Amino acid sequence: MLRRYSAADREHTAAAAALFYTHTHTHTHTHTDTLLLFSEAVQSEEVVMFCVWRVGGLCVCWGLLLISLCVDTDAAFTCTDSQFMCGNGRCITRKWVCDETDDCGDGTDELPATCVAKVCRSTEFNCGDPMYQCVPKNWHCDGKDDCINGADEKNCTVKECTAREFRCASGQCISTSFVCDKEADCTDGSDEVACPKPTCSSRSFQCNNSVCVPALWRCDGDADCSDGSDEWPQNCEGRLPQEKRCSPHEFQCADGECIHSNWKCDGEKECRDGSDEASCTHATCSPDQFQCTDGTCIHGSLQCNKKHDCSDLSDEFGCNKENVCEGPTQFRCRSGGCINMDNVCDNKKDCQDGSDEPLKECGLNECSSGNGGCSHSCIDLKIGYNCSCPAGYNLKTDRKTCEDVDECAQPDTCSQICINFPGTYKCDCLDGYQIDPVSKRCKAESGKIPTLYFTNRHEVRMMTVDQREYVRLIPQLKNAVALDIHIPNKMIFWSDLSLKKIYSSKLNMANDSANHNVVVGSGIEAPEDIAVDWVHENIYWTDSALKTISVATIDGGIRKTLIADNLEKPRAITIDPVNNFMYWTDWGEQAKIEKSGLNGADRIVLVNNNIVWPNGITLDLVGQRLYWVDAKLHTLSSIDVNGGTRHTVIQSEEKMVHPLSLIVFEEKVFWTDTGRRAVFSANRLTGKDITELAVDLVQPEDIVLFHDLKQPMSTNWCRRGNSLNGGCEFLCLPAPMINKQSPKYTCACPDNMVLGDDMRRCVAGSAVLPPNRTPTTTKSPRKLTTPPANPPQQATPEPVFTAKGERLAISPEESPSSHPVTLYILLPLMAMCLLIFGAGLLWRHWRHKNTNTIHFDNPVYQKTTEDEVHICRNGSEGYVYPQRQMLSMEDMDVA
């Protein structure tokens, strides 16, 4: 039952809002903690403002007219078992007790006596004095301090290395194959101490740097030695010159790599071997010109003009903000100059116009009368005054009234859930995560240490993020480039650029090549990235040579080219099989990031400005944000999945020399850098705490992360109920979840066939991509609909749209005239129907005005206490949806 708030109640809750949690279950099957907040700024006895905050900080507010109820206003709140009762009678969730934040408003949740009395659950570890915090037992001895006093990492036993591992002096365990391989794999370098001179077998070739590679790799056109000595001319006598494979508008590096021709001699080494900057002569700019990083010259006045005049954008780097005389020690003269505040009202004119010595204002205290009109603090100045606000508030445009700062509106304020309060905010976590008391970020409760897998040209390596274990998973690969993992099935997938194939294997058997399976073995040229759909059991890949994006079943038995138009150099791809979208980068002449459904429909461009060489891209499925690296701009950036709230996380030519791939988990981002031959990590929210995880690598490219929470399960509508492959003859592909009316899947055919009239069977024909597949920058994608299984024999003519989107009417064919008698019968019936329809509308309008309702987006609440929600289906799976339900305030029971 809802209480009526009196003036005393509003004064009682002035310090903070009364709140409670509801656990919603969205269509993404991810539990989201949603907080409903009663604002303390209630001025009316009957109107209360509700704010609902979700992941990303989105807020929807309603003003609800509450019916006055005859309830004793002095009645105290009753807290549940999961809540803590504050000294002022309010209830807060127990997980906020002793978290170094006053959530009660009276400080009783942070008192020493409260913390000592805090009892941890059997699945938790008590940190002890002084805060007595509770953390999951799985966090105990995980190599990271989670208790503020570090108690969870004390008295821990040292990890035991296996028989196939070498123990470093630091206690780290690495593969024995890493010892004396000319690479410092131990963090302390102890694996390269006292190493004998290596010798190679008769079946191997010894590189100039003493590393051994299979003899078959010598002189095969690929530089398999890190120094390229297996392809040196003196080691390959009689071999035919390598055939040029780059396009006319590209430059071919000495190692065969292709880059844009305008990147040659631009001052940066884009080729891995640096051949694009060999024998280059850079122009000398005149004294009145600015020299871009690529060596070109522009007029000096174009630097820092807030426009990018250099092709590499270097003319806008490091620009300082203009001096606006900010701060309490500065005073701006009306003539435009700045003087020290000590020189104001000192009976000496320091400004040229004398504006620092006004007779009427010097010595006048405007704050003494009505606080100067300021809503909070008034600061008297030598001339005039300023209004100021406490922390968490900003001045409105009137420069007098303070308003709350919505910290949650800023991207990456919190790693998962952001809750805005008046003057402050609080971060919270989704199910399966918990706030780390030390970092204040969300950490997986399971305690399982996340594991990184990354390619290193001839092998796939595995490393725990705490660096305690670092081993080789798959050895003796030719040129491993792309990598992905099917976590529920514990399978690993990779592509080999030299062999032009995609492989798979069980993780626990991947070290033996006999267990490697070819998923795609033909029809591909340059599989630069792959993405595994763990829900619908498909695999997607990009091909930069064929300029396509394709899909196949996870065993490779059925495949199809999804996108083949308007692609220049598709590189990385990442997918969201919960909402059925895919995202990819293209570093062609017009670099961009694009998005479409997993069936190739509803394709749009998300980013096409301030982007030059986008390599890796990854999706934070929890926060619905995309992260990508740009090797030319040396940046790591993020946007939301609709292309908004762009944020540059890291911009550093030193830290991001040639970033190639990345992955995010919890508050961390991990990436590979081929320029620095290393793997790094950093805080994905701030870009700080950049750490080297693996160094001295040969050619690190793709990187993925293994953890149970990385791939949440969802519904596979293609296998729902008794449906086999969704009723599709060839391939069933998930359709993008644009709205609630969106279809769950669509059928697809082989590249040499098209869908028949029933949109399920395939018929002969050339699968030509329609013009509407052309990408646009529109942020509102069109709705994809699937025709019914049995279409009517005669279809009503549909409206026609021109290329500009203008609607053209189609007139139906003229039909024979009917007998006039028919009109005498039909007209009275139509008039009667209109009267009944109008009366119904009036009744619904009256009923709507006299009924207090709340509409929730969460389908769990779209029902009354007596109704059931049924998502019905007909012959076409999941195409019928229940109507929106209304929840009356009389059905709610709110303390």
Image (cartoon, helix red, strand yellow):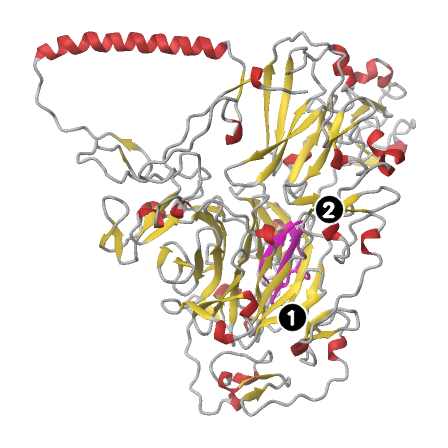
What's the mark number on residue 471?
Answer: 1
Amino acid at pointer 1: Val
Percent x, y of residue 653: 66, 60
Which residue is located at x 62 percent, y 83 percent? 211
Say few, some or many: other residues with alpha carbon within 10 Å of mark 2 (under 14 / 14 to 19 / 20 or more): few
Residues drawn in magenta = 649-674
Classify mark 1: helix, strand or loop: strand
Left or right of 870 on screen, residue 812: left
In the image shown, does 590 or 595 lie closer to the viewer? 595
Amino acid at pointer 2: Thr
Percent x, y of residue 679: 65, 64
Q: Quadrant of residue 800?
A: top left
Check whether the beta carbons of the residues at disc 2 and disc 1 lie within 8 A of each other.
no
- The secondary structure making up most of the magenta span is strand
Percent x, y of residue 793: 17, 36
Determine if residue 385 is in view.
yes
Magenta segment includes 264: no
Which residue is located at x 43 percent, y 84 percent? 241
Left or right of 342 on screen, residue 491: left
Percent x, y of residue 71: 69, 9
Rounded to the nearest angstrom, the CA distance separating label 2 from label 1 is 31 Å
The quadrant of the rendering that contains the N terminus is top right
What's the mark number on residue 123?
Answer: 2
The quadrant of the rendering that contains the C terminus is top right
Magenta segment includes 652: yes
